[in-house]
């Protein structure tokens, strides 16, 4: 899923990349901004989009992505993504069992 209203551009080594936020993950610390998973459409060795991680910061009705996350923040994001997949699979299994 892509959030059309959360697209942005970054410049790395003089090259401009269009990036799109693919997931928003709420931070368990209510005072902290939510985390985002985004891609600049670079591919990995399996031809899948490389996911990048950041924190969505709001300032004066403007947004920016803080990309310098601590390792424990990235670990939290990945754990939340796994939980989301497990919940989805459990929902599909429940739906299949309900129709039998």
Image (cartoon, rainbow, N blue to C red):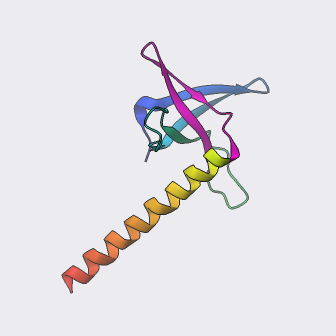
Residue 27 placed where, x, y %?
Answer: 47, 42
Query: Seen from this angle, which residue lies furthest right?
Result: 13
- Is residue 53 magenta-colored? yes
Q: Who is closer to the viewer here, 70 or 91?
A: 70
For residue 97, side relative to residue 84 (left or right): left
Quadrant of the rendered image containing residue 52? top right
Residue 41 placed where, x, y %?
Answer: 62, 43
Quadrant (top left/top right/bottom left/bottom right) for the C terminus: bottom left
Query: Seen from this angle, which residue lies furthest top?
Result: 60
Query: In the image, is residue 87 above or below residue 25?
Result: below
Query: In the image, is residue 99 above or below residue 82?
Result: below
Q: Who is closer to the viewer here, 66 or 14?
A: 66
Count numbered badges in the picture.
Answer: 0
Q: Residue at x 68, y 61 (%)?
A: 46
- Is residue 51 magenta-colored? yes
Q: Residue at x 50, y 55 (%)?
A: 80
Residue 58 placed where, x, y %?
Answer: 47, 22
First to last magenta residue range:
49-71
Query: Seen from this angle, which residue lies furthest bottom?
Result: 100
Q: Residue at x 62, y 56 (%)?
A: 48
Quadrant of the rendered image containing residue 5? top left
Q: Who is closer to the viewer here, 80 or 98?
A: 80
């Amino acid at each position: 899923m892509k959030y059309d209203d959360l697209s942005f551009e970054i410049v790395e080594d003089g090259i401009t990349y269009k990036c799109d936020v693919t997931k928003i993950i709420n931070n368990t610390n209510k005072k902290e901004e939510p985390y985002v998973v985004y891609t600049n459409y670079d591919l990995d060795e399996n031809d899948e989009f490389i996911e990048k991680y950041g924190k969505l910061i709001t300032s004066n009705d403007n947004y920016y992505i803080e990309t310098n996350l601590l390792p424990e923040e990235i670990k939290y994001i990945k754990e939340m993504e796994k939980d989301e997949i497990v919940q989805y699979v459990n929902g599909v299994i429940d739906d299949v069992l309900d129709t039998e």
